Amino acid sequence: MQNKSIWLDNYKDNNVKELNQDLTLDVLIIGGGITGISTLYNLRKSKLKIALVEKDLIGHSTTGHTTGKINYLQELIYYDLEKKYNLDVAKLYLESQLIAIKQIINIIKKEKIDCNLEKVASYVYTDKLEDIDKLKREKEILESFNIKVKEHQNINLPLKSLYTISVNDTYVFHPIKYLKSLKDICFHNNKEIYEKTNIISIKKENDYYICNTAKYKIKTKKIILACHYPSFLIPYLFPIKTNIEKSYITASLSNHLKDTYITSSLPTTSIRFHQDKKSYLIYLSTSSKICNNLDEKSNFSKVIKETQKLNLKPTYLWKNDDILTVDKLPYIGYIKNDDNTLLIGTGYNTWGMTNGTLASLILSDLINKKSNKYANLCSPLRVSLTDTGSILSNMFCNMKGFIQNKIVKNKNWYPECIKIENGIAIYNDGKNIYKVYNKCPHMGCSLIFNEVDKTWDCPCHASRFNLEGKCIKGPSNYDISCNKEFKYNNFTIK
């Protein structure tokens, strides 16, 4: 069993370019996941001087750890939006998802991208009596929007189901093959992409933003924050307007079927099949808020055991984090009133393939000064008085993650090879001794040790660091190695 995403196995790219000079731009895109690359693709013929920077490699953060579903049947989303807003909002969101799906399919066909695209049926099921009426209402809402929906009493898997609905016009694909193809197309259109390039601070000077890497500066008129968790947005209350959900995923050799499945509510179980040289069943479960269930070894063990109950043996094992918004709509667009220079795309509520693509359409339209039908629906500036409860819950989760995760000697899930001395975490693997600072540079949360991945993880905002202390996933922009001075992120855009 490999501790990596199936999408990133055997990843090869001979066209990786790091920033090696100062730049002056019209638009800088920060983040090379589906949002960033798709936005650059949409702007590939623009006369504006545009570049994209990615902290790691293209697609290696959240996009490379998803299940790769292209789907508008998203648990109870239309029921939830009707309850919180009204049917018009639910319908508009459905339209946005269908537009995003159409965009992906059209790009794949136009560019002749080989990314294992398959049209599939998708099922949402429940084993909870209290969810049956909600799921029936979900069916009624979709049918009122002229979507053909079937209902079932059982599903074709050994999982308990009391009631199920399905649609036939959804898709699955290989997300990294798709992104890599978009990257190559952008290169051919002379758009600049810099990987292994980390923006550590942003400062506003007159009409330009000055974005600093460790060695170079990028001067730009506009910024699109397409990174999973934008570390520069403390003044905009991002941490309390969202929470982070973590999930654990396996991929196992299996007979190939073409359907996808997901539970109607938490705890989430999600299943899809992937056909390449071999056939795999991809299984996701054990979802929870990031501040809960801190014993990562136990979380991984649980998803392995659940996979084994399906008579499958995991070949791949990985973890993913998703940003959830308070009202289940993504945050896409301008961050500040009367300021068209700073834009964002994030908060996709576990449906990143469609919402990341939707973000690319909205963001590229805004850059081109065009109207977009879905911009107001997804505006980060929206405010609802009914969000108060969710905001308080997010504040509690942030405080809980900050307080409860102090690494101390009596944490019963830590092996004996870990010690904490004066704020320094020490790990001895029998061959080497690793020492790191036991705080996340993002906001100072104490870290927990992920014994399965051998990483130090932040249970507040999902930053991750390897044994040497190198930051391998944001929002932190700094390392925690004891060989370097400890720094906090310069997360405020001044």
Image: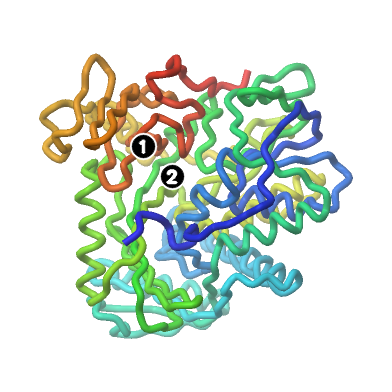
Residue 50: x and y in percent read 78, 41
Circle 2/circle 1 CB separation < 8 Å: yes
Query: Viewer-proximal residue, 20 or 297?
Result: 20
Query: Viewer-proximal residue, 257 or 255?
Result: 255
Is residue 43 positioned above or below 479 on the image? below
Where disc 1 sits, the SS reads helix
Residue at numbered disc 2: 326
Residue 58: x and y in percent read 60, 49
Residue at numbered disc 1: 394
Q: Is residue 81 visible?
A: no
Q: Quadrant of the C terminus?
A: top right
Residue 162: x and y in percent read 25, 78
Is residue 280 positioned above or below 332 on the image? below
Q: Amino acid at mark 2?
A: Val
Give the Cα distance between marks 2 and 1: 9 Å
Seen as rendered, the residue at the extreme front is 431
Where disc 2 sits, the SS reads loop
Q: Earlier in the sequence, mark 2 or mark 1?
A: 2
The answer to whether 360 appears left or right of 410 in the picture is right
Is residue 279 positioned above or below 76 on the image? below
Query: Viewer-proximal residue, 3 or 92?
Result: 3
Q: Amino acid at mark 1?
A: Asn
What residue is rendered at 43% in x and 85% in y? 150
Determine crowd level at label 2: few under 14, some 14-19, many 20+ residues with C-alpha closer than 10 A.
many
State the image quarter where residue 399 is shown: top left
What residue is rendered at 58% in x and 40% in y? 380
Q: Quadrant of the N terminus?
A: bottom left
Q: Is residue 20 visible?
A: yes
The answer to whether 101 appears left or right of 150 in the picture is right
